[in-house]
Amino acid sequence: MPPFRPFRPLALGAAALAVCLAAGACTLSDSDSANRITLTVDLFGSFGFKEAGLYDEYMKAHPNIVIKESGTPDEGRYWKNLRNRLDSGTGLADVQGLSADRLAGVVRRRAGSFTDLRAVGLAAADQGLLPWKSAAATAGDGRVLAVGTDSGPEAICYRTDLLKAAGLPTRRDKLAAKWSTWDGYLALGRKYAAKAGPGHAWTDSAESLFTAEMGQQRVRYTDEHGKPVHADNPAVKTAWKHAARLVEDRLTAKAPQNSAKWNKALSSGGFATVICPAWMLDRIEARAGDRYAGRWDVAPAPGRAGNVGGSYLAIPGTSKHPEEAAALVEWLTAEQQQVRLFTRRGLFPSSQGAQAQVRLAQDPYFNNAPVGEIFTQAAAGTAVWVSGADDTAVQREFDDELRAMESAGISRETGWKRALAGADKIVGSR
């Protein structure tokens, strides 16, 4: 996406890197070439390391290192493959990406498959990260199993032209005030639907709202003692009520995020607002295209501060080069690299120091929205989650039933009962 503006001039690395890059200083002798180490990195989606030129830069600074990245676009497929490799203990890379949603399961059930980063010199690697980001990667006995890369603080992306045509406010501050709560967001959506008419949805899908509202909760599906609370937690019930009301009021485009229908809706005005974690801005721009530059804008999300998504890097215990892998992870997740990934790829930092550097950033595609300030505030206010190993699978049950409400017309009561039955089966099978 276009560079965020303004941002500070960046130092591209440590002093050693600058020396190494000067005047071809990083050349290999014949004996050095024979001692080259290949580090494999296996990721999902787009972490942006290769595209931002970070691998090339690191290899220039470390001529004995060769980095080879492999990837799987779909995180679900990636996790299935990674899980099978963890079970067999074979086929693992030196560095594996982990989604924030999978991390609780790794920490609680697969900690023995990954290197304790304290043992390879990364004891302080998570210092300076957002508290909730580093806490999620730390086991109960203090083992640090992963280091955070990007984060997904929440906001609302909206089409100013569509809201204006419906007689609604378009200024960020006025919208943020009107939808300061999820009930307010729903009420404004009903006003939009009444003015815009049939075929003009307020937002993409009910599951997007449910996911965002649950991303704002400290306790979601598991309490501090590891007890499942999906059936009784008031926060789950309230999020379900809001998401179900979206469907009942016909405010959604019935377009799950990243589906073909969602992509088409972005380029045709199929919905006026979308709950957008920081990483989604790049996707909106890519799918909506230049035609809609300046028509999109960004405002703070309803409810509390929250987070959806984000990623980590971890080192499997099978790595033959854990120290070298740790050095690479430390560099890739360092403050300056996180700043560069934001300015070049739109991936919002989990480093508080990096956030301070991008706080004044604006995004020209989104009407010069002050995205640095909006996302920094959301990230700072996010609570440290209480996460259970089954939380991702449990949430999928609720998401599936919200889709069934949209596509098959089942009632909110039927969807709730079915979601609870599916979640009970998941937690009861452990």
Image (cartoon, helix red, strand yellow):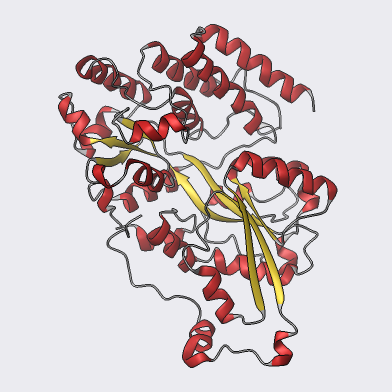
Viewed as shown, does residue 205 lie left or right of 146?
A: left
Q: Where 75 falls versus 227 (above or below)?
A: below
Q: Position of residue 373 (x, y in %)?
A: 32, 51
Q: Quadrant of residue 268?
A: top left
Which residue is at 67% across, 92% downward? 29
Which residue is at 48% across, 9% downward? 409
Q: Position of residue 217 (x, y in %)?
A: 51, 32
Front in this rendered view, residue 273 or 234: 273
Quadrant for the C terminus in the image: top right
Q: Where 424 falls versus 382 (above or below)?
A: above
Residue 355 seen in the figure: no
The total number of labels drawn is 0
Which residue is at 16% across, 30% downward? 164
Front in this rendered view, residue 254 or 303: 254
Front in this rendered view, residue 263 or 369: 263
Q: Where 187 falls versus 60 (above or below)?
A: above
